[in-house]
Amino acid sequence: MFRPSCIVSLVAAATISHTVAALGTLVAVGTTGNDTVLARKGNEVPVAIIQSVPAGSLQFNPSAFDQCAVSLNGSVKACADVVAGWTALGSGNVATGFSMSGTLTVSKPAIGDRAFARQIRALTFTIAGATASEPYILELVGTRTTTLPIADAKLTCVVRNAANVVLYSGPAAGFSTVLSLGNGTYTVELSAEAELEVLDLPNSADMDFAITLSTPELFCGSPFAGSCFVPHGSPHCNDQTCCETVCAIDPSCCEVIWDATCVNQATIGCTEPAAITTGVLDPLTGRRYAIVEEAIWLTASQAIEAEGGRLATIESAAKQAWIERTVSFVPPSLGIGSLWIGLTDAGHAGANEGAFRWTSGLPLSFTNWAAGQPNASDATDDYVALRLSDGRWFDRTGFEVERALAEFAVANCGGGGDCYAVHGPGCNDGTCCESVCAVDEFCCTTAWDATCVQFALQQCGNPQGSPVVAGPFINHATRHRYYITEMSSASIAERTAIEMGGMLAVPKNAVENQWLLANLANGALGPIAGWLGVHDQLLEGQFQTHLGLPVAYTGWDFQQPDNNGNADFVQVNPSPLPGFGGWRDTVHTTAAYGFIELGCAGDLSGDGAIGAPDISILLGAWGGSDGDLDGDGVTGASDLSVLLGLWGACPTTSCCTDHGAGGCDLPACETCVCDLDPSCCSTAWDAGCVAIGASACFEICQCDPTP
């Protein structure tokens, strides 16, 4: 059975506030047509019977044409059985559409005879109510079903306007097109032909067809629905995900009309959020984190996943603290109050309400809820945001708009084989893997071959033995210890510093910078470049320390920073031009030594001075590593010599004594305390900061809790 269809989709003008727009009308003006059957023996003059269909209004009952033609010699009889006619879909001539079906049957006595049947039907209609911005959309589709040889079964469709200009002409084999029409009068003419040639067998065949012109059923994602970002007079829009998102918030957008209210929801919820910060690299995992523009939770999650990432998972207190430090540098001018994270209990209700889960699939082993949260104050409080001011979590509705914290991992990093062996793509150290694949993506997409192993040795250091290659170096002005670690990427150097209980060095003034240049960059290893604990990964050109603090001092080299190659990390050049500090911004995969800074050398007891208690601790750790001061991994005579050389009070930046400047001499303690009270780093390290070091951060700071 041949089933063509001409489908009209009507898109009306904009309306506002969920008032149904008055759709334009599709009106049938009239129909015309004719039927033909023809018989011929050999090359004789054919005999034809033709029936004309009178012009008029819609035919609500199909017309029948069942005729036979006999050849001149009377030996050939060709018959055509045609049943067809336009009928209205709706009431009267003002309709929602029109349809027509027909059957052509042709037969002949024997081979050598020819039988032919043709039907032409035309429908004239008018369109009113279209606008320049929203014309009517017509889908015109034709197919066919026949037992004839394919070349002898033809179906064509021609569309003309009132000036008889052909707007579309469909091929004989069927057709499919979309027309965009304004107000006016149009004619659709269908021609169906069936023919048995002289050599055709069998001697009887048919072709069935049907045409429908109708307003299509609209649904989310329908190509006939209007744009999600333009008001129109019908419900739904043409982007399935956006449409479903909006209609989950406001069902009338899919039930009544897609008006300006729906467009506003689509603009908020469906516009793909762009990153407003560049990715910050977590040195412990090799994952990058970025803040993206505001959107509802679902849209943010889908957009980030489309880019290969996910909303951030915060699986531990350490990750929570790192995120807080990282995003604390976001300037108030961006107006970011909260960030979506990948925690939700959507889909859970009743007894399961509050069963929150990470979209990453990781178990919920750590939480940081604000007081009274989650409270499910609204039935749709299914999504979680992190408040920047204090890092606490709140459950929110799916209708609210926030920026989002996106998390990205390099494919195949963090799993697979050892980074120093040949195997499939990726390796098991996420940070090392990211550094290597940033240089050669083949290592993560195809195979971790010998070249990747060589890159791992260059970027990640030697896996055997201590990463320390020189030190300690004591700055007697600050009593801080410094070590030089093997060449690596910036992220590996930062991770090594964290594992050693310190941080990448951050000179606080020109005097400290000159000491570092003299003793580390131009010390025992000769002129070398080294990583500092400074970067601008979060916001280009706004440098911060790895603790998320503003940089109080910068010692840039000549014409630096230049952001060459999107350089977000800082090395110190051992040979700066006179009057310059030697700092250069550099891409993190440029291998350099790590300049590691630790707290007050020799103060093993944490009492702010090097004295008898420290000797007692060192002797008790003899042969182990807890009293190691010279960086060889073992507590021994050389460590005792270092301690005795440092005898006396530490500078007044001890974490366990109050002092005027912000921060303290033990980086890990400083981080813990300042996470709880940022003023301890930005303003002054006062008695309150010491109290935090003796209570909430005691395990890290080891400050005496007694007055």
Image (cartoon, helix red, strand yellow):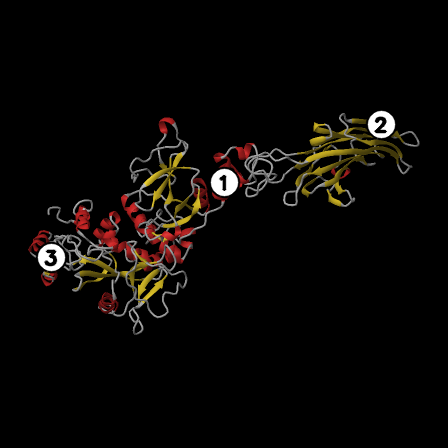
Q: Earlier in the sequence, mark 2 or mark 3?
A: 2
Q: Amino acid at mark 1?
A: Gln
Q: Earlier in the sequence, mark 3 or mark 1?
A: 1
Spot occupied by residue 39 in the image (x, y as percentages of width and height): 87, 33
Q: Visible in this render: residue 1?
A: no
Which label's residue is closer to the chain start, 1 or 2? 2
Mark 3: give few (<14), some (14-19) or many (20+) Cα within 10 Å.
many
Q: Mark 2 = which residue?
A: 67
Q: Quadrant of the N terminus?
A: top right
Say whether residue 298 is left or right of residue 605: right
Q: Nearer the viewer, mark 2 or mark 3?
A: 3
Tag nearer the camera, 3 or 1: 1
Residue highlighted by disc 1:
265
Question: Of helix, strand and loop, which one carries label 3?
Answer: strand
Q: Position of residue 586 (x, y in %)?
A: 36, 62
Identity, as a three-letter code, of the amino acid under mark 3: Ala
Q: Label 2 is placed on what type of residue?
A: Gln
Image quarter of residue 108: top right
Q: How far from the left and from the top, in percent, is residue 82?
A: 79, 29
| SS category of the residue bearing label 1 | helix
Q: Nearer the viewer, residue 5 or 9?
A: 9
Task: Measure the alpha-carbon separation of dots 3 and 1.
Answer: 62 Å
Crowding near the residue tagged with mark 2, few <14, some 14–19, many ≥20 C-alpha atoms within 10 Å: some
In the rendered view, tell whether residue 140 sits above or below residue 570: above
Determine whether 55 is above or below 231 in the image: above
Find out whether the residues at labels 3 and 1 contact each other: C-beta distance under 8 Å.
no
Q: Which residue is mark 3?
A: 609
Nearer the observer, 128 or 483 = 128
Q: Nearer the viewer, residue 663 or 176?
A: 663
